[in-house]
Image (cartoon, rainbow, N blue to C red):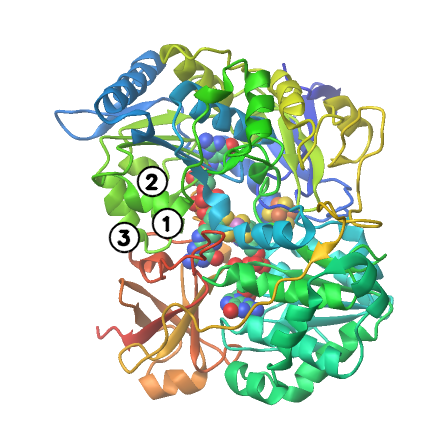
Amino acid sequence: MTDGARVATRPGATSREAATHCPYCALQCGMTLRETDGRTEVLPRQFPTNRGGLCQKGWTAAELLDHPERLTTPLVRDPVTGEQRPASWDEALDRVAAGIRTVQSGHGRDAVAVFGGGGLTNEKAYALGKFARVALRTRHIDYNGRWCMSSAAAAGIRAFGVDRGLPFPLEDLARAETLLLVGANPAETMPPLLRHLTDQRQRGGRLIVIDPRVTATARQADLHLQPLPGTDLAVANALLHIALTEGWLDREYLATRTTGFDAVRRTVAGYWPAEVERLSGVPVADLEATARALATAGSAIILTARGAEQHAKGVDTVTAFVNLALALGLPGRPGSGYGCLTGQGNGQGGREHGQKADQLPGYRKIDDPAARAHVAGVWGVPADDLPGPGVPAYRLLDSLGTADGPRALLVFGSNPVVSAPRAARIESRLRDLDLLVVADFLRSETAALADVVLPVAQWAEEDGTMTNLEGRVLRRRALREPPPGVRTDLAVLAGLATRLDAPVDFPTDPRTVFTELRRASAGGPADYAGVTWDRIDAASGVFWPCPDPDGPDTPRLFADRFPTPDGRARFHPVTHRPAAEEVCADYPLHFTTGRVLAQYQSGTQTRRVAALRRAAPGAFVELHPDLAARLGVTDGEEVRVVSRRGELRAPARVSPTIRPDTVFAPFHWAGAARANSVTNDAVDPVSGMPEFKICAVRVERVES
Ligand SMILES: Nc1nc2c(c(=O)[nH]1)N[C@H]1C(S)=C(S)[C@@H](COP(=O)(O)OP(=O)(O)OC[C@H]3O[C@@H](n4cnc5c(=O)[nH]c(N)nc54)[C@H](O)[C@@H]3O)O[C@H]1N2
Ligand SMILES: Nc1nc2c(c(=O)[nH]1)N[C@H]1C(S)=C(S)[C@@H](COP(=O)(O)OP(=O)(O)OC[C@H]3O[C@@H](n4cnc5c(=O)[nH]c(N)nc54)[C@H](O)[C@@H]3O)O[C@H]1N2
Ligand code: SF4
Ligand SMILES: [Mo]
């Protein structure tokens, strides 16, 4: 069943190898898994994104395969004791199906919701969307990609007509004379990507970083802009203001490849650099140097990541940088353009195949009659039976268990108890449900609340495809079978679909699912019709769109036209506004959150890996020495970060690398150190992205 080949290493030993990719982030570094006499090791593998490199998380990924805390039997909550206890698969799946029937017969189809994840393979994301629409017939499905790159996705669609995080291969970064990173810290979040940045600088390129902290990435930059969190939009408009004033715009490109610049010109005219300096703290000289470096370079790339995007104005902030890139004529030019650094392993593919509230496979809109007809045809159901759009992730989770919200939730590939904004509230919503079902291979904090936990296979035990941050579809290849007692996500969905008398088949073989996905995506914006597993195997992946099995794929978009009705990119004027919550006397500091190298996301996986736990044992609160002195806090002392929503407790990390008016904490930990106890649940009105990157807090000493 697996593609792992048996090879002999030393006499007497048999070993099995699989050429696959790391289970974690969107860089999808190439790795070879080798199992010798029952021991599995990770070897780095040359792939265009990682070029033979791996970070510490990748190196240690195999440790979870045989981890003592691995789930190998379903758990059901005992109605008498209230505790989770082991159960057979039949008992567990029967219980889920019965619970769904009860909830739906009492409260309607939409009373059951599904929450997916950007770590699921394309096949699983597709099957999950189909399961929600066809087996449950609920409109309520959304996923954690809403927390991730939804603001960049919305801005990309609005400007370019399509959302592919990077519209060019990663290797193009090295060709940019100027590279601007906005709210991205790849030195910690995608370390092997730095090989491309090193190349870029060795070729004489310049790196500019915008981040409120002097990160490991910022330290490598030729120029570091250190703005107040939440002011990137104003900074971008000021950069465009300067370029406009200096006459640096690409007139020819504006005239032939774009529409709508006049409104943007009028808007940015008001963004005087001196005023933006007062607002953001970025000196006028640095704004000017940045604008000059971008505008006068032969080639330039602007990349955003979560620092710019995870705001209640995330879509407009990304739009401001897209406007800048368009005005300079960058998108579609060699070694130039705008891109977003997608985060999760399948963050790109996960947003294309229908686990988004408003979406059908192929990045189609669920309210488009032609899209509904096409996909319903592939699924073999009447188009009228497909539900309409649901609501974005936060609204969905926040409505659970309330009078008009869903009463049952199925979670595949997310741990919202740790990762959702205002997490204490979401946790209590989850507790209010009639039925919570979690499929996971570890007992995450969310799984611990579940009525039924379904133990599923891990990445090394399954075949499938992932689409990395470049829009490159690649193959996940199984090394071995799942352990006894464990099923794949696809098998779980099939088992439930049968019990729910679903009108159509839910295949469990990922290759079969992919063939169906290709048909469902055919003709859509993210067209996979020409992508086959064999074709991926024969090359280093296949870039979408790829409509024809015998035609080319698309490593680079926008060379001649944009996929908009008139072929032109669209400007949108955007204006700065304050964060949803501003500082005040009671909460005088800005709080921002993010990541550290050795932990991944909600930490379910990486907190259980010994080497990673040693490298990053717990949360911390980063604060400037001046602020620490004012508060009387010493390095390592336990502090409390308090917002209107809750508090977190962790040791202080006193460091001059952060602005004195801002404190930072990573979000990987649960319990008292949970950063999301503090964060704000304000969301972007267009994308539904929560404001993870700024809220108002005070910091207090925790007297012993
Ligand atoms: N080690 C590790 N790597 C990961 C992950 C992980 O959990 N751990 N997760 C993966 C995923 S899903 C994602 S989405 C990516 C995220 O990758 P990144 O976006 O690189 O990571 P973050 O740490 O969330 O945010 C980046 C930076 O934004 C800065 N920032 C905060 N507020 C602002 C602001 O208002 N403006 C600007 N300009 N910057 C600001 C922070 O100081 C931080 O250094 O990482 C992926 N890789
Ligand atoms: N404060 C703050 N909060 C944030 C962020 C931030 O920057 N600041 N970043 C946000 C971002 S960008 C993201 S992406 C989210 C991520 O946060 P989450 O959505 O919680 O993502 P993970 O921690 O990766 O959770 C994945 C869970 O699914 C399990 N899992 C992994 N693979 C599979 C699979 O194939 N099948 C199944 N069934 N389960 C699987 C894992 O064991 C884990 O328990 O956090 C968001 N939350
Ligand atoms: S950079 Fe991302 S894909 Fe590469 S090894 Fe690290 S976590 Fe895995
Ligand atoms: Mo993410």
Tell me if residue 572 comes above or below residue 214 in the rendering: above
Q: Quadrant of residue 493?
A: top left
Q: Is residue 137 left or right of residue 377?
A: left
Which residue does the image show at 67% across and 46% down from the upper left? 162
**Side (left or right) of 469 relative to 679:** right
Q: For the residue marked with disc 3, what is the amino acid?
A: Ala
> Alpha-carbon neighbours of circle 3 within 10 Å: few (<14), some, or many (≥20)?
some
Relative image position of residue 112 (x, y in whole percent): 32, 29
Tell me what residue is drawn at x 78 percent, y 63 percent: 198
- Could you give the CA–CA distance between mark 3 and mark 2, rounded to whole angstroms? 12 Å
Q: Position of residue 403 (x, y in %)?
A: 20, 39
Mark 2 within 8 Å of ligand 2, using the beta carbon? yes
Residue furthest to the left = 80
Mark 3 or 2: in front is 3
Query: Hey, which quadrant is residue 380 in on the image?
Result: top right
Disc sitting over residue 424 in the figure:
3
Along the line of sight, the residue nearer the viewer: 6 or 464: 464
Sequence-first tag of 1 and 3 = 1
Q: At which x and y percent is residue 606?
A: 48, 46
Ligand 1 position by quadrant: bottom right
Q: Is mark 1 within 8 Å of ligand 2?
A: yes
- Element carrying mark 1: helix
Comparing 506 with 217, the one in front is 506
Where is residue 133 shown, x and y percent of the image? 45, 25
Q: Secondary structure at mark 3?
A: helix
Pointer 1: what residue? Answer: 418
Q: Disc 1 marks which amino acid? A: Val
Q: For the C terminus, which image quadrant?
A: bottom left
